[in-house]
Image (cartoon, rainbow, N blue to C red):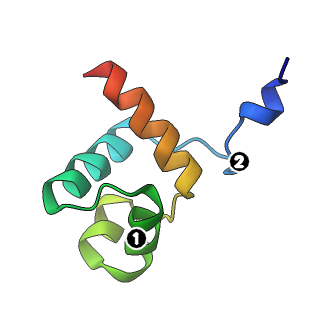
Amino acid sequence: MKTYREYQPRQSFLLPPRMMTALLLYDYCVGVPSSRKIGTRTHEDIAFRVLAGNTHPDHTCIRCSSCVSAWGF
């Protein structure tokens, strides 16, 4: 059985759900479904950076958010 720490994303702080939902919706609209590419784009693309609130979420955090958002829709 896995412990809570093994399931916890590498990023230590929680990101606002509204910000992550807006980021994920924009990503899918422009055709960037990969969590690693989304994380890279938050460093390179100004639109991604604005939506992310000038933060750079880890790809595991993005992946976990996309799984939670998929169940929420």
Q: Is residue 37 left or right of residue 48?
A: right
Give the class, few, some or many, for how many residues have Cα within 10 Å of label 2's Cα (few <14, many ≥20): few
Judging from the image, what secondary structure is the residue with disc 1 in?
Answer: helix
Q: Position of residue 57 (x, y in %)?
A: 52, 58
Q: Amino acid at mark 2?
A: Ser
Q: Residue at x 47, y 48 (%)?
A: 62
Q: Is residue 69 above or below residue 40?
A: above
- In the displayed orientation, state which residue is furthest to the bottom: 44
Element type at marker 2?
A: loop
Q: Could you say which quadrant of the image residue 45 lies in?
A: bottom left
Outermost residue to the top: 1
Q: In this image, 7 relative to 57: left or right?
A: right
Residue at image coords 79%, 25%: 4
Q: Amino acid at mark 1?
A: Thr
As drawn, the residue found furthest toward the left would be 29
- Tell me the quadrant of the picture where the C terminus can be found: top left
Quadrant of residue 8 within the rendered picture: top right
First along the sequence among labels 1 and 2? 2
Q: Position of residue 36 (x, y in %)?
A: 48, 63
Q: CA distance from mark 1 to mark 2?
A: 18 Å
What percent of the width, then of the height, locates residue 53?
39, 61
Q: With 4 as the anchor, is 27 left or right in this view? A: left
Q: What residue is rendered at 19% in x and 61% in y?
A: 31
Instruction: Give me the disc on residue 12.
Output: 2
Residue that appears at 85% across and 17% down: 1
Q: Residue beneath label 1, please?
A: 42
49 vs 35: above or below: below
Check residue 8 in the rendering and tell me which mark sits there, or answer none.
Answer: none
Residue 51 drawn at (x, y percent) = 30, 59
Q: How would you rate the neighbour count of disc 1 (Cα within 10 Å): few for under 14, some for 14-19, many for 20 or more?
A: many
